[in-house]
Image: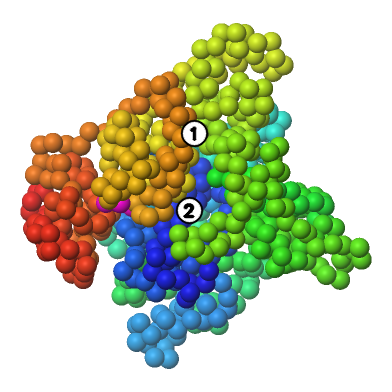
Amino acid sequence: MPEVKLDEAAALEELTRLADELAAHDIRYFQDAAPTISDADYDALKRRNAEIEARFPHLVRDNSPSLRVGARRSESFAPVTHGVPMLSLDNAFSDADAAEFDARVRRFLRLGEETVAYTAEPKIDGLSASLRYEDGVLVQGATRGDGRVGEDVTANLRTIGEIPHRLKGKGWPAVIEVRGEVYLGHEEFARLNAAAAEAGDRTYANPRNAAAGSLRQIDPAITATRPLRFFAYAWGLASQPFAATQWEALQAFRSWGFAVTPNAQRVEGASGLLEAYAAMEAARPRLAFDIDGVVYKVDRLDWQERLGFVSRSPRWAVARKFPAERARTILEAIDIQVGRTGAVTPVARLTPVTVGGVVVVNATLHNADEIARKDVRIGDTVVVQRAGDVIPQIVEVVLDERPADSQPFVFPTHCPCSLHTLLARETTTAGVETVVRRCTGEFACPFQRIEHLKHFVSRRAFDIEGLGEKQLTAFFEEGLIREPADIFRLARNDAAMAALRERERYGETSVRNLRAAIEARRTIALDRFIFALGIRHVGETTALVLARGYGDAESFLAAMDKVADRDPEAMAELDALDQVGGAVIEAAAAYFGEDHNRRIVQDLKGQLLIQPAERPKTDTAVAGKTVVFTGSLERMTREEAKAKAESLGAKVASSVSKKTDIVVAGPGAGSKLKTAAELGLQVLTEEEWLALIA
């Protein structure tokens, strides 16, 4: 539904969905190096979120994508707090956007007709990293993470030949964080993938994913075998100034021993920005590494400081994206795939074609409405685009080459599973139909059951090695594993394990490793347990919130049973948790309102030792209290305030209720402050709060 037609209830539901969906995509991109959505589609989701927030500013959520950069760091690496946050850039997509960027800069600085100088630098498609040098010596290296806290990958970064362990020359500050991009060249990527395929190991879809996967290896010795490279282009914390312009800074990096991005230019005015973009786009096919755009930066650093930041992006820089590469091919068939939640997705099967250096055989068609809008038919010649150079999609049909006997595609009305259950359009809580069609078979549908099992054993859930899609599908079809608890019963089924040893590609070692991997997960953290259940709208972040909110499995499941029964107090308690809204409440009620689900969860619980959430502190002034932050905070960000409160044993809620103990109100506090006054709650200013927790 267009943003302008949303009422407040529908807008809140859509913002909840967008926050969860974008958070999941951030994890897949930044942590897993395995994105499942194109850059263009991701940008469209963020724009939709921003447009809805602009219409309903009072509905901006604490976990809004507009307030977030990157993704939470992986627990596999130690945390590193950046001296200066590593922020993201706003995007420009056209000449008009680039010209407007120049106009905004001049308006803000009140320059009139004075021309602004910029640097135009290739936007390297790799993994951002920050290198901290003290007295010229590399002491720490980190990934971007969520922009404020990254992952300590110092040992891995030391293996990259283009990163100096000691700075050369002179003029470097006593302490400086040099920032840039870790990447793989085209030739190095081809050799790496060829060697991996020969050895039967994982191959990567593109150099960016390969660079991210290589840098984030637990064993630095593995990273050392990967031909990673590094370009320096920015800096964070610096103990003293070392340049007056961005251009001078790039020359300083080169003199200190870093490689800097080639083809970078210093240009003047909007016309210079457009000329630099055209030159970079023309040079792109001949570069030895991937770029996906051009970054424009105001050259003068004093002007950068005056321009400052808006939200999580600098006003003085913008990223101009390239259009995706395209190719023509034949659409041979349209298959229907069924996901874990029953959502069906049409997938185009294509005559193989190379797009941007990758052989494409499948492309997403998104949904039935999209097929109808584009009038995509089997046998058509279609234009395929690797949007964001990652996920293939069909952008148009070449009508002049359509076969004379072609027929419009008729979207199926029933699931392709053996039960042929009805497909139904999903509706919002406001009764509005969406583009999503779902199989109504739920757990009776074998496709959904297999997808649930795949989610259950996935990396961020139970993370059971040796149970991939192929093995799970085979075990499901044979009746060995039909639901999650069966996985743990299988590990102690000696007869079944003995039969596995006799299979091709199995053996004593494989069976022993599988059994050990399953047994190692009989003890599981509560948040992973909740995430693994596959409740709609409950991603990794929400699962952690629920775990901390309820403390242990017994309390969580008891509360969910009451939510399923629509107990008002239980629903209010769930609603009060930070980052939990109507979509999560309805999903939890639906999930635990299904007797089949309750039986599966209880059966699973009997096989496990579920660890309670980390015990909060009990010896602080706010331990055990429920705190709500409202209005603007001036001494710290909202995220910092929440993290500090939780570290001191407080529970942070997003709404004010009779269970709230403290409301911390900054400038601009609205309805929450009014509710606090009506309930007679303790209200503190930011200064009073800081004094309380000091």
Q: Residue at x 21, y 42 (%)?
A: 647
Percent of width and height locating residue 677: 11, 64
The kind of residue on which mark 1 rests is His
Disc 2 packing (10 Å; few <14; some 14–19; many ≥20) = some
Answer with mark 1 or mark 2, whichever residue precedes in sequence.
2
Q: CA distance from mark 1 to mark 2?
A: 27 Å
Q: Residues within 10 Å of mark 1 (few under 14, many from 20)?
A: few
Q: Which residue is rendered at x = 34% and y = 34% of the image?
A: 557
Residue at 61% from the left image edge and 53% from the top image edge? 424
* Secondary structure at numbered mark 1: helix
Q: Position of residue 300 (x, y in %)?
A: 38, 74
- The secondary structure that most of the magenta stretch takes on is loop
Q: Name the one closer to the observer, 148 or 172.
A: 148
Q: Which residue is mark 1?
A: 596
Image quadrant of residue 106?
A: bottom left
Q: Is residue 232 left or right of residue 381?
A: left
Residue 311 or residue 660, whichever sits in front = 660
Please say whether residue 142 is visible from this viewpoint. no
Magenta-highlighted residues: 575-579
Image height of 513 relative to 48, above or below: above
Residue position for label 2: 21
> Can you tell which of label 1 and label 2 is closer to the viewer?
1
The extreme bottom residue here reads 113
Q: What amino acid is at disc 2?
A: Glu
Q: Residue at x 64, y 51 (%)?
A: 423
